[in-house]
Image (cartoon, helix red, strand yellow):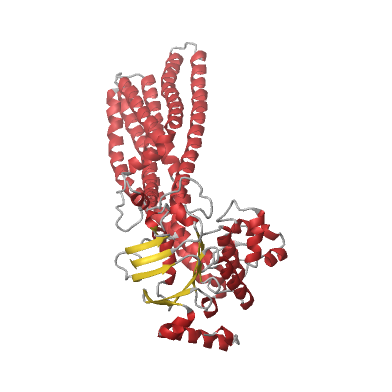
Amino acid sequence: MTTREIHRAGRGPSESVPPAPPAWRALYRHFRPHRRAVALGGLLALIGTATGIAQPLAAKELVERLGREEPFTAILVTLTALVVIGTAIEAVGAYVLERTAESVVLAARRSLIGRLLWLRVPEMERNQPGDLMSRITSDTTLLRAVTTTSIVSAVVGGLGFLATIVMMGLMDPVLLCVTLGVIVVIGASFAAVMPKISRATTRSQEAVGEMSTRLERVFGAFRTVKASGAEAREAAVVDEAAVQAWRHGLTSAKWQSVAGSSVGLAIQVSFLAVLGAGGARVASGAISVATLVAFLLYLFYLIEPVGKLVEAATQYQVGAAAVARIEEAERMATEPQAPGPVPQGSGGDSGPASVAFEDVTFRYREGLPYVHHGVSFEVPSPGTTAFVGPSGAGKTTVFGLIERFHEVSGGRVLVDGRDVRDWPLDRLRASIGYVEQDAPVLAGTLRENLLFAAPEATEQQLREVLAQARLDTVVDRLPQGLDTVVGHRGSQLSGGERQRVAIARALLRRPRLLLLDEATSQLDAVNELALRDLVAEVAREMTVLVVAHRLSTVTLADRIVVMEAGRVRAMGTHAELVAGDPLYGELAATQLLATADRGGSPQEGP
């Protein structure tokens, strides 16, 4: 298998997604690592069941001794011991199963988290974050019972049911036939309920996922919601999703109640039938009163194994619905996972990186229009290259293709003359520092955000980058300095401060290639000028690509790539393009007018 084949695994629209396995096989995959602990819990439960089966025999002996006026103390002690020992053993078995169930959930969550964090960017964009979070939290919880308790319930309940039926048959086959006739009739209606439980549970989990999605949307734009006075409207939207989850949950609970009550109904009807038929057989002398008492005790004891079988069947339907959503998430296409951490700035070579596009075409997925139509350009190293053009020209997409967030539909993207698809993905990205358009800041401290891409950076390196990005004065005024919590999505920082944090984070990575996507959009004039100086400084040691709409950011670039409608229209310096390309001249003139209207300096013009 070639390097490219390895690193293209799970990457494109042509990738074939494996079919979903049957529910029982998927559940077995979660159960298998814990089968020994489940077997231990099952063995303890089986011992408890055996003590329960012995209790009616002891009761029969007690009744017979009472009838014969014989001593009964020993048998009474034996009966009591069976009850106490059986209860204690079942309690220990239940604890073992509950502990194992928590381990199953933990393993499933670890597996799912590890999978989802390596999702390909297009896969993530096709799914709602709230729904994916629901699969990790809510759906995995439903695995607790189905992979442990339900399996033991099915085995122990089945064996207990068979053992009880055998004992009842040895006592009186006629009464056994009466009992089974009633159970079969009611069991048929129970079987019809099972698919309804599965459907209702699936819809309930989907509704919970939808509710999580809507909540994530609200919390992600909390200030916008408040500024728009939209709290009531958004609360109503989330409430609607919560009501849908409630309705489907009620439906599932209704059918589970029907399934559970069918057990009690079957036993009660059986009791009446056995009592009538058994009374007649006692009167005819076919069986003794002690036999009838023992048979009735077995009949009531039958509630437990039958209940376990019903519980196992119900939990299987619930678990099957949850595991289907988990399996769907685990079949999503992922990027190849790195075998270990890659030192920052090490992409296999040293020095600034060169970039080239060769007749690149790209669209986000089948059926959508192309974003790039044969894009070609070369960016030598080092230096600064600016990408300009109208909105929708495909400038930001250039960065996404270099980072391999998306794969080209045609042509090649080269870094250091090597197709990015031939690069190990971890080493490719270790060579790149990327400042996104919205400059995301994560919840946590300022230090954690700065070290996010370079956790091994020294304190000295951190201080140097803070000074370069003009963040040192910001740190000095924060109450806890670098250890100040910046809030959800950096809410405690201004827009310009968040951009400077993103820039410092990228520089601390010591990249060979720096991608700046509208990195000055929220900076004031003073900090924008400082950033221009910083870019000019670092461009001597690395290759810098800039997507910019501000003319002041563009004029000092070593080369400018003008894009329009997904194509490269022209390349050159600022002076060359002003003189030779009408679109660039128009963009430059527009920027001049906008600058003049704001009271800007005319020296920034062409």
Query: Which residue is painted at 51% across and 58% down in the image?
Result: 351
Query: Which residue is painted at 57% across and 54% down in the image?
Result: 454
**Observer-nearest of 245 and 146:** 146
Query: Which residue is painted at 47% across and 78% down in the image?
Result: 573
- Residue 544 visible (yes or no): yes
Badge count: 0
- Residue 408 visible (yes or no): no
Give percent across and percent down for residue 109.
Answer: 47, 46
Give percent across and percent down for residue 549.
Answer: 50, 77
Query: Which residue is painted at 32% across and 42% down in the image?
Result: 190
In the rendered view, tell whether residue 465 sits above or below residue 329. below
Give percent across and percent down for residue 576.
Answer: 45, 81
Lateral position of residue 154 relative to residue 536, left or right? left
**Observer-nearest of 261 and 501:** 501
In the rendered view, tell whether residue 187 sits above or below residue 224. above
In the rendered view, tell whether residue 570 sits above or below residue 101. below
Which residue is situated farthest in the top direction here?
Answer: 70
User: Which quadrant of the view contains residue 423?
Assistant: bottom left
In the rendered view, tell whether residue 510 sits above or below residue 310. below
**Observer-nearest of 120 and 262:** 120
User: Which quadrant of the view contains residue 473?
Assistant: bottom right
**Observer-nearest of 403 and 79:** 403
Give percent across and percent down for residue 55.
Answer: 44, 22
